[in-house]
Image (cartoon, rainbow, N blue to C red):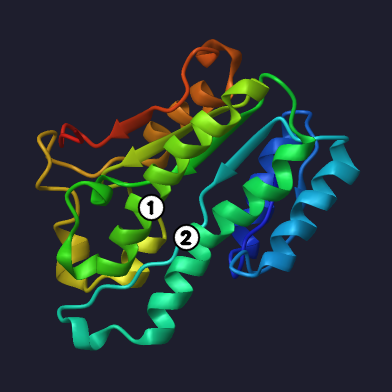
C-alpha cells in the first residue's frame, strides 16, 4: 500500500502501522496532490516499490462552508477543483499504463453530487464531476479489464467535519438522514474493500451510496 496525503502525517503513520502490523508493506509519500508533478511522482514511487498498481483509490478532498457566493474566492474555487478532481485525473492518467486486467479504480464522490448542500458549492460541484469522470473511465478502460466505480458517502465522521463546519452544524451532523445519525469510517470502508476485490469482478461504472438511507438516484 502507498498513501499520499498533506498535513495528515500522524494519521498516515498510524494507518501505516496498522498495515505493517498485518504483515503488509506501507509506503508514505507526503505531498500536495493538487500538483500534477506530485501525482506522477506518487505513481512512479508505487511502481518502484510494488512493481505495478492493482488498486487506485482517489480520496483526497478539500471543502469549506460558505453562506453566499461572494464568500468563495477565486483561489478557493480553483484549488478545490485542482485537488478534488484534478488529482483524480492526473493519478489515473499516470497509473493506467501500469495497471493490468482485474485492476480497480475507485473515486470518492458524495451524496452532494446529486443533492448539493448550497453551503458547499465548490465541493459539491467537484463531487458531481468525480461521479461523471468515474462513469467515463469505466467505459474507456473496460476493454483493458480495468474496473472503475465511485462511492457516494452521506454524512460520515471524519476530521474534515469539525475542521470545516461551525460548532452548531457539527453538533447536528447526520441527524437529518433516515437512520438519524452520521456514519463511522468503519461503516464506509467495507464498500471500498468490496469494489477493490475480485468479489466485485463484474461491478464497473457503478456509484455506490453509503448514506444512512438518504437516496442517491
Quadrant of the frame with the C terminus: top left
Residue 119 placement (x, y as % from top left): 19, 69
Secondary structure of residue under mark 2: helix
| Residue under numbered circle 2 | 84
Task: Tell whether 125 sits left or right of 191.
Answer: left
What is the x, y in percent for residue 150?
43, 36
Judging from the image, what secondary structure is the residue with disc 1 in?
helix
Decide if residue 166 is on the left or right side of residue 93: left
Q: How many marks?
A: 2
Nearer-the-camera pick, 136 or 183: 136
Q: Dot 2: within a 10 Å radius of its alpha carbon, few (fewer than 14), some, or many (20 or more) residues?
A: many
Of the numbered discs in the image, which one, if any, rests on residue 46? none
Residue in the picture at 39% in, 35% down: 188
Indicate left or right for 191 with 177 as reference.
Answer: right
Q: Residue at x 22, y 74 (%)?
A: 166
The residue at which mark 1 appears reads as 129
Assess disc 1: are there few (<14), some (14-19) or many (≥20) residues with their C-alpha within 10 Å of its C-alpha.
some
Q: Position of residue 3 (x, y in %)?
A: 68, 50
The answer to whether residue 56 is above or below residue 66 is above
Quadrant position of residue 123: bottom left
Residue 95 appears in which quarter of the rendering? top right
Q: Nearer the viewer, residue 19 or 95?
A: 95
Q: Quadrant of the N terminus?
A: top right
Whole-percent x and y of residue 129?
38, 52
Disc 2 or disc 1, which is closer to the eye?
Answer: 1
Residue drawn at point x = 46 percent, y = 18 percent: 203
Label 2 to label 1: alpha-carbon separation: 9 Å
Q: Earlier in the sequence, mark 2 or mark 1?
A: 2
115 to the left or right of 108: left
Amino acid at each position: 500500500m502507498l498513501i499520499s496525503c498533506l498535513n495528515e502525517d500522524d494519521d498516515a503513520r498510524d494507518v501505516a502501522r496498522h498495515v505493517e502490523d498485518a504483515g503488509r508493506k506501507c509506503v508514505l509519500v507526503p505531498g500536495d496532490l493538487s500538483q500534477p508533478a506530485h501525482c506522477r511522482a506518487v505513481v512512479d514511487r508505487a511502481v518502484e516499490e510494488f512493481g505495478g498498481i492493482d488498486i487506485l483509490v482517489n480520496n483526497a478532498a478539500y471543502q469549506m462552508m460558505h453562506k453566499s457566493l461572494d464568500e468563495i474566492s477565486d483561489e478557493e474555487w480553483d484549488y478545490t477543483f485542482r485537488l478534488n478532481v484534478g488529482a483524480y485525473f492526473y493519478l489515473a492518467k499516470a497509473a493506467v499504463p501500469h495497471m493490468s486486467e482485474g485492476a480497480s479504480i475507485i473515486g470518492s464522490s458524495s451524496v452532494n453530487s446529486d443533492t448539493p448542500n448550497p453551503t458547499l458549492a465548490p465541493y459539491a460541484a467537484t463531487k458531481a464531476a468525480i461521479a461523471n469522470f468515474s462513469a467515463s473511465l469505466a467505459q474507456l478502460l473496460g476493454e483493458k479489464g480495468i474496473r472503475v466505480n465511485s462511492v457516494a458517502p452521506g454524512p460520515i465522521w471524519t476530521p474534515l467535519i469539525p475542521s470545516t463546519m461551525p460548532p452548531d452544524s457539527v453538533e447536528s451532523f447526520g441527524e437529518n438522514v433516515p437512520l438519524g445519525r452520521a456514519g463511522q469510517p468503519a461503516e464506509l470502508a467495507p464498500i471500498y474493500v468490496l469494489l477493490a476485490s475480485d468479489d466485485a469482478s463484474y461491478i464497473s461504472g457503478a456509484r455506490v451510496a453509503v448514506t444512512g438511507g438518504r437516496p442517491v438516484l
